[in-house]
Amino acid sequence: MRLSRLSGSIVAACLLFAAIAAATLAQSAGKATPNELGTPGGTLTIALRSEPKTLNPAFAADQSSQDVIYCMNADLIHINRESQRTEPDLAESWTVSRDGKIYTLHLRRGVRFSDGQPFTADDVIFSFRVYLDAKIDSPQRDLLIIGGKPISVEKIDAYTVRFILPQRYAAAERLFDGFPILPRHLLQNAYAESSFSKAWAVSASPSQFAGLGPFRLAEYVPGQRIVLERNPYYWKRDAAGKQLPYLDKLVFLFVPSEDAQVIRFLSGDTDVLDRFSSENYSVLKARESAKRFHMDDLGASLEYNFLFFNLNDLAGKNLPQIAAKQAWFADVRFRQAVSSAIDRAAIVRLVYQGRASALAAQVTPGNKLWLDPAIKPASHSVQHARDLLKAAGFSWRADGSLVDRGGGPVEFSILTSSSNAQRAKIATLIQSDLSALGMNVHVVTLDFSAMADRLLNSFDYEAAIMGLADGDADPNTEMNIWPSSGGMHIWHLNEQRAVTPWEAELDRLMNQQLVTLDYPKRRQLYDRVQQIVANQLPIICLASPDVLVAAKDRVGNFSPAILEPYVLWNVDRLYVR
Amino acid sequence: MKFLARRLLYSLAILLAISFLSFLMLQWAPGDYFEAMRMNPRVSAQTVEVLRAQYGANRTFAARYVTWMGSLARGDLGVSFAYGTPVGPLLWPRARNTLLLTGSSMILSWLMAVPLGIWSAARKGALLDRFFSFATSTVLAVPDLLLFLLLLLLAVRTGWFPAGGMVSSNFDDLSFWQKAGDVAIHFALPALGLAVVALPLLLRHVRAAMIEVLNAPFIRAARGHGIPPWRLLWRYALPAASNPLISLLGLSIATMLSASLIVEVILSWPGLGPLMIQAILARDVNVVIGVVMLSSVFLLAGNLIADVLLFASDPRIRVE
């Protein structure tokens, strides 16, 4: 008995040892751990799809500008792109008042801007004065307006600041990510002279810039590249106490198309690559070992592609044909039938070569904190779709075409942007899926601006496919979409008040989650939002493409994440082997 | 002098008409820069309206055109919505790159077209002439886009040329001669591509003009006087055939400029092409008009130079 217990213990110990060894081996054989000690020096080159339009954080609205600004600046509280949770950055710690409205942030001491000037509370106060200034009208200003009122900022002492929120705000900590701290000593004159909007243009001299990020501007060559050099005053150190960043230089080349970026990567001009399609993933995969790089499929991004119908109020728009079809679109059974007839698995397989996830609602599998796994994508069933249509009063002619109650044929067009090849393919697949129901669907592609004009102004469309990509995993970023008053309540803009009970519930849930600080409670509320979206289908969610990245084998600490900037979020720890 | 002044005035009138028409067409194009901005869920409709007002995009067509004319007089060509800076400084460095590429390609194509055209004309109907005829027909039939993509394929497959850009990413670390070599190797493929696009038309015109002159009685008389064929071609026939070729010089600039926009995008040459494409897609109106105006200025300047050369070379025009 004792022997058997002893042998059992030995076996258990051996199994445990084997498991640890296997795990260790798997780790060493797989990708490098993100925080390995790097070697200082070297240059990393990456391509940007377009030139940054500005290096002024208060005005950056395009991805390229934001990517470069990210490497040159720092914020008070940062969202860790890997864990998707907040962590201290320039604010070493913070406390929250019992009512959840006052955040007191304690700033890190001894931090210097990239020009050697010290960072203090005055810089924080100045930065938020700029971001909140209605005359500056920074695109981020809206994030600082909570419940219609702006937040306010007070200096307590040189290293303590207090943020007073007009109401409880669930995503308050996440708010600080995306508000880089500006150097008061360099920008206060421009601000006082009302020339702040002209400050920090891309073409400004490098000596005019200073940031708290790992890199600072070294050179800008119009149309060609931006070169950043290491910030000698950067405060972060690695585990061995060595100052970060490891890289001496970071070069952004301007390469205007995805295919050209792939070619430049293959020809060795760039070291890392992101934002490319699954077609290019296959092309690159075939040459992975020969060209000494490795690729990663990080799984679903936060982007959700969806189909929606025009439910806008068309009074005064002189669009009688579309208005007549809105009777179909407004019927939830029609939308459910369309959703059921769409073969999402085929979209994932044919459009994304399997590198995407089918969606039930707006939250993608990439969003670990907020996905409700209980909601499954509608199963593809033409029969179920037919039953729904029959119940809604539709019928079929002898030739198989679908007609409505009044005998009118069910025919509509789907609008999509010509700049996104994947969405155009999705539209064609949906056209084919819906023809199985007897619907006559046309696909119309327009360039993005023309499409935006129809969706936002003229309402001259019947259905459309588009995609939205949240910058953050938090539901806070969706406040402009789900409440009926939201500016991007795209299927029914300018809705004065909720017209259906489920829309009223959406309004209530979204407003309630915004002020609920307890995560489990807030999650319950947002789960319900997802359920309503999946059942009522104001938008019919289709698929979320995976985040695909590639890096040369010589790039150390490469640890891409599904939050932007995918490959540069830990740029201070990247190094060249 | 009067001739030159008349031509200048004529060019200015054309530029004015081009600017007006460009404005009008962009006005008619659906959507604008700010609509696309509204598609970002993080930006509120109010913010977009404020920006629209700030840039004056909500004013009437006439008001915006008059403001733009004022900015033209100041030389800044209005403000780019996307960059938030005057358009002029955005254009100048890129225009320099475009001019470097198109100018060099044009010289290269003429340097190839004139001797080959003369050679082909002198051996009319011979195997070589027929080969040139076949080759030029083939190149003419191939779309520019395909040709540039083939060049890109050549660069990627062989590794002999860089796959794009104007300089390598380590350009700053190179010595002067290495820098010159780096620019030259980056420059080779787009310049060759543009020269090949322009060559067939030039070669055919040179050949046709030379054949016509070579059949002229004065050449036959010169030949009868025993003037050697080489001297006959270069000293007597070429100057006589130069009139249509000088006119062609102006026209070839248009071909070069339109082809350069494509080659710049495909081979990532940092000229006006990529800026123009992005500005069109984003409806950054002032940048689009700036590029159109600058291209028109290049075109008109080329034609003006051709006119002046014609004026200098042809006494009949001087008499008129």
Image (tube, grey):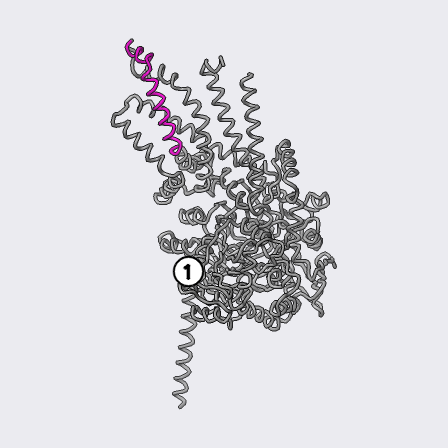
Relative image position of residue A383 (x, y in whole percent):
43, 70
Q: Determine if residue A31 is in view.
A: no
Q: Is residue B298 left or right of residue A352?
A: right
The 10 Å Cα crowd at callout 1, few under 14, some 14 to 19, many 20 or more, is some
The answer to which quarter of the image holds residue B159 is top left
Relative image position of residue A542 (x, y in whole percent):
48, 63
Q: Is residue A443 left or right of residue A318?
A: left
* Segment tinted magenta in the rendering: B195-224
Q: Residue furthest top?
A: B225
The answer to which quarter of the image holds residue B126 is top left
Of residues A493 and A234, which is closer to you in this image?
A: A493
Of residues A298 and B6, which is closer to you in this image?
A: B6
Residue B212 among those drawn in magenta: yes
Relative image position of residue A85 (x, y in whole percent):
58, 64
Q: In the figure, A146 relative to A21: above or below?
A: above
Position of the N terminus of chain B by quadrant: top right
Under mark 1, the amino acid is Ser
| Residue annotated with mark 1 | A432
Relative image position of residue A84 (x, y in whole percent):
55, 63
Q: Main secondary structure of the magenta part?
A: helix
Q: Is residue B54 left or right of residue A393?
A: right
Disc 1 chain ID: A
Q: Residue furthest bottom?
A: A1
